[in-house]
Amino acid sequence: MIQLKKRCIPVEGSCVVLVGMPGSGKSTVGKALNLKSGLAWVDTDYLMESWWGMPLQAIRDRLGLEDFLVAEEELICSLKLYSTVISTGGSVIFSPLSMKHLEKLGKIVYLKASLETIKNRIKNTAMRGLAMRKGQSIEDVYDERISLYEKYAQKVIDTDDVQPDENAIEIISWLEK
């Protein structure tokens, strides 16, 4: 029988966790950060789609809001990642349990975008798989979430009128301090 030695000891807290509104740039900045830093990259929305075998909107439609948030929490709390950029779903901040787990995994970076920028970037909210209550507008969602993003953020990065590569460089500079 072959004996394998553990050659790499994972470091808790070695990840970079991107939070923010849908359209704030979590996936785009996450990819740029992956390329510039050499860290691995995962997008929890893509993980949800892989886990359920359907697009995010179909998951949201099938489960309803509350069960969707529970499914997201289960996925987040199952993550065992090291040296990885984690682009989260915008609704992750509704779960204190998820946020506590993400804080253990690494530094929380809030990608902040104005409401106007968010509206320009996400034209069709009906197909985005957004965790919105019936009758809720994107303005309502924005107002509801901003204080939560700020509460958990260890670093705030403005993504209005800034290229993803520039955001990635700013995050890397902050991490190196």
Image (cartoon, grey):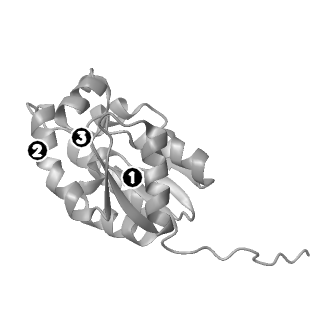
- Callout 3: SS: loop
Ranked by sequence position, the earlier of labels 2 and 3 is 3
Q: Is residue 94 above or below residue 142?
A: below
Q: Nearer the viewer, residue 152 or 131?
A: 152
**Amino acid type shown at disc 1:** Leu
User: Foreground mark, 1 or 3?
Assistant: 1
Q: Quadrant of the N terminus?
A: bottom right
Alpha carbon distance from label 2 to label 3: 14 Å
Q: Nearer the viewer, residue 159 or 142?
A: 159
Residue lying at the far right of the rendered structure: 1
Residue ID for mark 1: 18
Q: Looking at the picture, how far across and down is residue 94, in whole percent? A: 22, 55
Q: Is residue 126 above or below residue 111?
A: above
Count of all numbered marks drawn on residues in the image: 3
Q: Quadrant of residue 119?
A: top left
Q: Is residue 135 left or right of residue 28?
A: left
CB within 8 Å, label 1 to label 3 = no
- Callout 2: SS: helix
**Amino acid type shown at disc 2:** Asp
Q: Looking at the picture, how far across and down is residue 161, in whole percent? A: 32, 33
For disc 1, the neighbor class at 10 Å (few under 14, some 14 to 19, many from 20) is many
**Amino acid type shown at disc 3:** Ala
For disc 3, the neighbor class at 10 Å (few under 14, some 14 to 19, many from 20) is many
Q: Is residue 126 above or below residue 154?
A: above
* Residue ID at (42%, 36%): 163
Residue ID for mark 2: 143
* Residue ID at (17%, 50%): 146
Ranked by sequence position, the earlier of labels 1 and 3 is 1
* Residue ID at (45%, 43%): 166
Residue ID for mark 3: 131
* Residue ID at (25%, 40%): 113
